[in-house]
Amino acid sequence: MTDDTQTSGVSIDGVDAKPTDAGGHRLAYGLLISGLMAFSMGQTVLFAVLGPIAREIELRETHVGVIVTCSALAVMVSSALWGKLADRWGRRPVFVLGLGGYALSTFAFAGVLHAGLQDVMLPMVVLAALIATRVAYGLIASSVQPSAFAYVADITSEQNRSSGMAALGAAFGIGAILGPVMGAALAGFGLVVPIIAAATLALLLALMAWFFLPEPPRGQGDRPPALKLTDARLRPIIYLTLAIFSSFAIIQQTTAFYIQDKFALTPQDTATTVGLMVGGMAFSMLLAQAVIVQVFKPSPGVLVRSGLPLSVLGAIAVMWAPDVPLSMAAFAIFGLGFGLLFPGVNSAASVRVGAEEQGAALGIVSAAMAGGFVLGPLLGTWLYEQTASWPLMLVAALCALGWLATFTMQLSQPRQTN
């Protein structure tokens, strides 16, 4: 890596910087982490309450799958483009645009949910409006992740790349913990209120990032080289990411239905219980990313080959758990595995490309993640309607196959020319 900020200086929480740049990098890291926390809070609140709300509006499980799949499809088709634009326009404007777009589209989504709960619109009209607002979200908010991770790639060395990526992953974990807490605190005012609160926080942080987030130095050039989805350096990472995030999407989209039906809970109790389970899973993700990765600084290969078996174990434990407390423990195991996988695939992709390709590469990885949310929700909800345990069985199988496949890959392979 040739970036001057990485050749000499001190390490700040895994970020390499010259002493004169230390304050600026701390500020940037704080704003990126806060923005990603707000982004994650909105997602975990949504996953906890959308299932119960959908049933109140008289939508089916597969309708929820369609909503999330359409949103993920929009993310998938736009993430790579946003990654390239982050290389051309800069990290800061793309990050701010994505965070602000996420907030506004989430306000619209909450408004449609409220209208459905008040019987202002017919269920199928509500479904169409929910799909439209989530597609708008997907097209704009898909810029948040590649721009943020490319920013960190700009200010970290290859040796510290995993810990830098994990720090942003930890921000997701913190947000995923705070989201259910906020949901539990505000659900008494209405199931839609936590979603509105998360969107408000994201909008405020977008404004702060616009005024205070500095643009990082990065590899220069008139135009970054075109990085294709079929690039041989990224191809194995794309396939692996697709399998991992399909599994995670299946877990997220079927959990509320599974817990509500297995333990015969009311919609309000389901939202609270699932919120606690998602919070526990997020705490495990945070433990993995903020403690394990930061202390031991494992290579991308070690992260991925450790995370996949834990995810298999977690999925099996969820099926086996006979009560709510053991179910929470099972989700915590799954979260620990995924907490290792998230920085693993991002850092594996990042170290394979040059400084001028970071945004494009991480945009492609984000597209692969979104691809998992295209396949996972529809497949998971359809399987759930057949037999409640089938989605979890598929998750265990996908993660096990992915783990076996990693032994044919060089996940920590040094960067090569295309």
Image: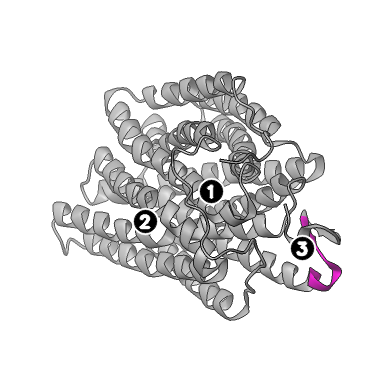
Indicate yes or no whether the magenta region holds residue 31: no
Q: Which mark is residue 31?
A: none
Q: Secondary structure at mark 3?
A: helix
Instruction: Give the alpha-carbon distance from disc 2 to disc 1, as whole Å.
Output: 19 Å
347 shown above or below 38: above
Q: Position of residue 254 (x, y in %)?
A: 38, 36
Is label 1 in contact with label 3 (beta carbons under 8 Å)?
Answer: no
Q: Position of residue 118 (x, y in %)?
A: 22, 63
For marks 3 and 2 on the same chain, the one whose residue lies earlier in the sequence: 3
| Residue 197 visible in the displayed image | no
Q: At x 42% / y 37%, what residue is drawn?
A: 255
Q: Which mark is residue 138?
A: 2
Q: Amino acid at mark 2?
A: Gly
**Residue underneath mark 1:** 361
Indicate yes or no whether the magenta region holds residue 17: yes
| Residue 222 visible in the displayed image | yes
Q: Is residue 229 left or right of residue 68?
A: right
**Residue underneath mark 3:** 4
Task: Please rate how many residues cluster around mark 2, counting C-alpha atoms within 10 Å: few if below 14, some from 14 to 19, many from 20.
Answer: many
3 shown above or below 312: below
Q: Nearer the viewer, mark 2 or mark 1?
A: 1
Q: Quadrant of the C terminus?
A: top right
Q: Secondary structure at mark 1?
A: helix
Instruction: Give the alpha-carbon distance from disc 1 to disc 3, as whole Å.
Output: 21 Å
Q: Give the magenta part as a residue range.
A: 15-22
For marks 1 and 3 on the same chain, the one whose residue lies earlier in the sequence: 3
Q: Position of residue 86 (x, y in %)?
A: 51, 63
Q: Amino acid at mark 1?
A: Ala
